[in-house]
Amino acid sequence: MRPRPFNLLAIVCTVCVVLVVLLAFHSAGPVNAPYATYVERPVEETGATNRVASIYLNYRLYDSLLEILVFFVAVLGVRFYLGVRERPDVPPLAESEVVRTSAALLFPIAVLLGVYLAALGQISPGGGFGAGVIAASGLLLTSIALGIDAIDRRIQRNAIERIERGALVVLLLLVLLPLPLGHPAFTDLLPKGSPGMVLSGGSIPLYNVLIALKVVTGSWLILRSFVRHRGEI
Amino acid sequence: MAFSVGVVLFGIGLVAIAIRRDLVIKLLALGLTNAGSILCLVAVGDRPDARVPICAVCRDVIYADPLPQAVVLSAIVINFAILALALVFVMRLVEQYHSTDSRHIEDLVQRELDEGGDQ
């Protein structure tokens, strides 16, 4: 490969940026950096002992909302560009009995783990995004083993699309609900509960479950579009 | 240490995006830059002997900074979204031009534009 002048320039710029960042980081040091005060705030503010969840679903809920909107736009884009013509032929099934049996074994575990992570995201590691991806990977495993038609026959695609859009609409409504009640938007109106219990953290469990629904349906729609377009997994 | 590795990974990915001509490898490199930035964020939030920031009263013990970890969530989701969308565009390009070579595709597009201008 012969490098063009632009390539050399790009390499030199990248190396310079990397060196500058490294030097700046080592001169300041991570210990001397300003310590974020979120972890020192009283737990009663959000009710969630998981401070990461209390940040991305309470203090900085707008961040997560925009993130979900980006994800929604990606799902729309994938389906817009891939969904134009779907191949009518059925994707070939996996021949292996091992794959089929292990998929049947692992699918309930994946779904259960997803529900657990989404429901307990306020008191333990986890949260809606990870839970959704885990449940979607269970769906992907099943579609590898049984074929995508088997899943399409069991779960109506319209229902999945409705859940995907419905979760987003409910999220937006929940975020804007405090406005007519006389509070600023993004205010958490639900009772905080006692920290450490399952029903604590105000709206955080609700948001986690909605985000998990949104992510599992969105990921599944993306995967399904790719499989349908390509004709095989 | 982890921060430096993250920055170097980011740099390798960026260089690969710039100089590799294969579109799929460009996407893989984009994933590498994302992994590097995530590693940087996690390293920034770390403290010596830090514990997991899940606690009712977070005093007396050093806890990892939860703010960069919350940002990592956004980074992962947006990386997934961007990669999926970019892969779709690569698939469309491959279907139309039967090549994943970015320079070859550019030449083909340029030829199409020139032919369109002549008419």
Image (tube, coloured by chain):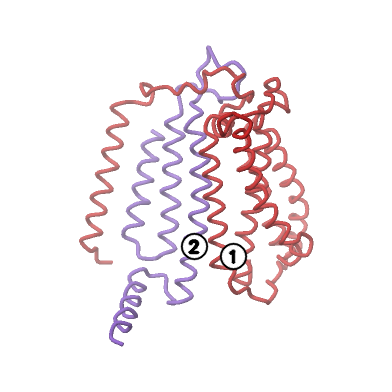
Chain colours: A red, B purple
- What secondary structure is found at the residue carrying circle 2? helix
Name the residue located 34 percent from the left edge and 80 percent from the top edge. B112
Q: Is residue A5 left or right of residue A171?
A: left
Figure check: B98 above or below A17:
below
Asked if residue A133 shows in the view, the reply is: no
Q: Are marks 2 and 1 on the same chain?
A: no
Q: Is residue A126 above or below residue A35?
A: below
**Label 2 to label 1, Cα distance in Å?**
10 Å
Which residue corresponds to the image point at 29% horizontal and 81% vertical from the top-left?
Answer: B114
| Three-letter residue code for mark 2 | Leu
Image coords of residue A225 (percent x, y): 61, 64
Q: In this view of the protein, which residue sits in the foreground, A134 or A191?
A: A191
Q: Mark 2 touching mark 1, by CB under 8 A?
A: yes
In the image, what residue occupies the spot 35% across and 51% down? Answer: B14
Q: Quadrant of residue B44?
A: top left
- What residue would you read off at disc 1? A226
Q: Position of residue A110 (x, y in %)?
A: 71, 47
A192 and A118: which is toward the camera: A192
Chain of the residue where label 2 is placed in the rendered structure: B
Specify the quadrant that holds the N terminus of chain B: top left
Quarter where residue A51 is shown: top right
